[in-house]
Amino acid sequence: MPCALLAQPAEQNVIFGTYSGLALLMDVYKPASPNGYGIVVIPGSGWHTGLPYNANLLKQSKEFSLYVQKLSAAGYTTFVATHRAAPRFHFPDAVDDVQRAVRYVRQNAARYGLDKDRIGALGASSGGHLVSMLGTLDGNGTADSQDPVERQSSKVQCVVALYPVTDPAKVDTPSGLQAVTSFMGAPPRFDPKRYRDAAPLTHVTADDPPFLLIHGDADKTVPYNQSEAMEAALKKVGVTVKLVRVPGGDHGSDFPGNTQKMDWPGMSLEWFDTYLKKKP
């Protein structure tokens, strides 16, 4: 069964960083025949997580079970990461954490048998927002840091984002607006600059990596126009981008209500095969 793949990672609860004693954890899925490329996976959560001691961790999400299965079969090593989340934490904490995850993978590329200069990212919803930030932020490391991980770049070389938030200030659905406001800590009118800083499309530059965007046109949580705006911003500066419209698709990795069944994991694999392995 597809979910069995996520239940049995090759390395579980790998600590890729700590914050004030809080361990940041990821699970690592190693393929039978590695191809030398790594994918950092950020499941969606509305940037939120439960507060009880026994709450499930983000890395335990089954959202990408089929995707990880397909990527592993093709030789990709995948890293499913947990990040700090609302209501306890706010922007930019989650962004800092996923950047740390990429830096950790890059620092340990030799141990995992990876090309450290060819790392991809896959995410959905809030995770789609975060991987879009990984693709658009400069992500330069701190050269004089005592922590070798922090010297590494957090920039990824290929992005697949499903139904991502790309401009938090313009999410206007009830559920989406509630999640965004909690993540940001306040409504847009109180701190418009903070919202611009949190928007991947405001960071788009010509040196950004290829983006595959997949979004249902009936999404009632993150409007389809969030991906349309990102596509337009990337095209404007000449970045390779493809937006796949899922007719009738609502919010979720199986795009409930879709009227045209598509192989979305296969599309993602094809994108990484085409562009992650391609040197710039």
Image (tube, rainbow, N blue to C red):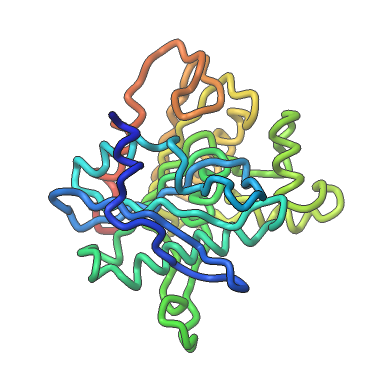
Q: Which residue lies furthest to the left in this view?
A: 33
Instruction: Judge whether 192 appears above or below 2 on screen.
Output: below
Q: Measuring from the top left, give residue 157's x and y in whole percent.
A: 36, 56
Residue 22 at x, y percent in the picture: 58, 67
* Image quarter hosting the C terminus: bottom left
Quadrant in the rendering for residue 177: top right
Q: Which residue is drawn at 42% across and 63% down?
A: 102
Q: Is residue 119 left or right of residue 55?
A: left
As drawn, which residue projects farthest toward the front?
A: 54
Question: In the image, is residue 134 above or below residue 219?
Answer: below
Say which residue appears at 28% left-offset and 29% top-offset.
Answer: 1
Is 126 drawn above or below residue 109 in the view shown? above
Coordinates of residue 44 in the picture (x, y in percent)? 53, 41
Q: Which residue is drawn at 29% across and 60% down?
A: 118
Instruction: Measuring from the top left, give residue 137's x and y in whole percent.
Output: 53, 61
Q: Nearer the viewer, residue 59 or 100?
A: 59
Quadrant of the rendered structure where residue 110 is? bottom left
In terms of depth relative to the viewer, which is nearer, 187 or 9?
9
